[in-house]
Image: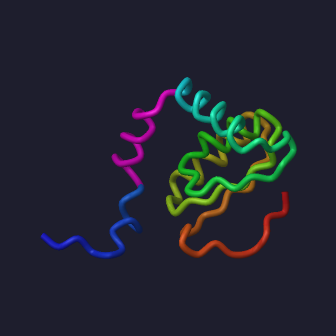
Amino acid sequence: MTVPSNWYENFFHGIALDLWRKAVSDEQTKDEVDFLVKTIECAAGSRLLDVPCGNGRHSLELAKRGYRMTGLDISEQFIEEARASSSAIGAQIELVLGDMRHVEGETKI
């Protein structure tokens, strides 16, 4: 079986996303963000880029802590989920559907 070079374009939807959602707990996400905040040493209010952002788990937690977030991911389903989660908590996160190999432009946040 030959795997096409663009396998990732169709991989990140459906069951693959279901498995990813179940693989990481909310507590693990908080622990990872604790580590990031400590390591990057950026003040709250700083602009951060989350690539690939998936369903926004890191972006959402960082936004709750006062960071201005932009997330980019190739999965339309995950970007839509991140937008819904962002809206539900009142966070203003710029979420961009795109390929992380080709990041262009500037954010507005």
Residue at left offset 73%, top offset 41%: 87
Please tell me in which quadrant of the rendered image residue 79 appears: bottom right
Q: Which image quarter holds the N terminus? A: bottom left
Q: Nearer the viewer, residue 54 or 46?
A: 46
Is residue 34 depicted above or below 105 in this figure?
A: above
Q: Nearer the viewer, residue 42 or 57?
A: 42
* Left or right: 91 in relation to 85: right
Q: Which residues are magenta?
A: 13-25
Residue at left offset 36%, top offset 40%: 19
Is residue 60 depicted above or below 105 in this figure?
A: above
- Where does residue 33 sit, x and y in percent of width and height? 64, 35
- Where does residue 15 sit, x and y in percent of width and height? 34, 46
- Where does residue 39 sit, x and y in percent of width and height? 68, 40
Is residue 23 depicted above or below 73 in this figure?
A: above
Residue at left offset 66%, top offset 55%: 71
Please tell me in which quadrant of the rendered image residue 22 appears: top left
* Left or right: 68 in relation to 95: right
Q: Nearer the viewer, residue 50 or 40?
A: 40
Query: Which residue is at the far top?
Result: 27
- Where does residue 55 sit, x and y in percent of width and height? 56, 46
Residue 20 magenta: yes
Residue 62 magenta: no
Please tell me in which quadrant of the rendered image residue 73 appears: bottom right
Predominant secondary structure in magenta?
A: helix
Residue at left offset 36%, top offset 74%: 6
